[in-house]
Amino acid sequence: MMKVNMGALNTLLREKFDNNQAKMAEELAISRYQLNTILNKNGKGAGKKVIGAIINFCEKNNYDFKDYIFLD
């Protein structure tokens, strides 16, 4: 099972996207609603689409996705 590392995701939101959820959601190619829900529910509801979007973002931007996704 995979989970989002919320600490790392929040840091990314703050440092790369200036806390702009709309900008981050656009870059991840997910809806602002999905991102907002995940952030407000501490990662709950992050399914395959969101985890895949984070992995794709990391690969495109030379980040290690393992910093953002916990692999159980």
Image: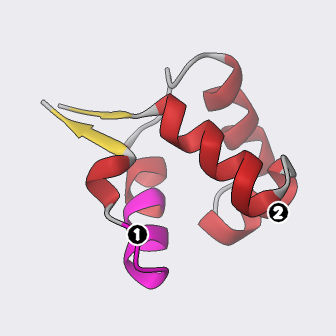
> Looking at numbered disc 1 in the image, what kind of residue is underneath it?
Tyr
In the drawing, does residue 22 fall left or right of residue 30? right
> Looking at numbered disc 2 in the image, what kind of residue is underneath it?
Lys
- Closest to the camera, between mark 1 and mark 2, is 1
Neighbour class for label 1 at 10 Å: few (<14), some, many (≥20)? some
Quadrant in which residue 38 is drawn:
top right
For image coordinates 49% across by 71% down, the residue present is 57
In the image, residue 56 above or below residue 71: below
Q: Residue 26 carries which label?
A: none
**Pointer 1 or 2: first along the chain:** 2
- Magenta-colored segment: predominant secondary structure: helix
Quadrant in which residue 28 is drawn:
bottom right
Q: Which of 71 and 18 is in front in this view?
A: 18
Residue wearing tag 1: 63
Q: Distance between the residues labelled 1 and 2?
A: 18 Å
* Residue furthest top in the image: 41
In the drawing, does residue 11 fall left or right of residue 56? right
The percent coordinates of residue 43 (x first, y second) are 51, 25
For image coordinates 45% across by 83% down, the residue present is 60
Confirm whether the magenta stretch covers residue 55.
yes
Quadrant in which residue 5 is drawn:
top left
The percent coordinates of residue 54 (x first, y second) are 46, 58
Confirm whether the magenta stretch covers residue 11.
no
The residue segment tinted magenta is 54-63
Residue wearing tag 2: 23
The percent coordinates of residue 48 (x first, y second) are 36, 47
* Secondary-structure class at tag 1: loop
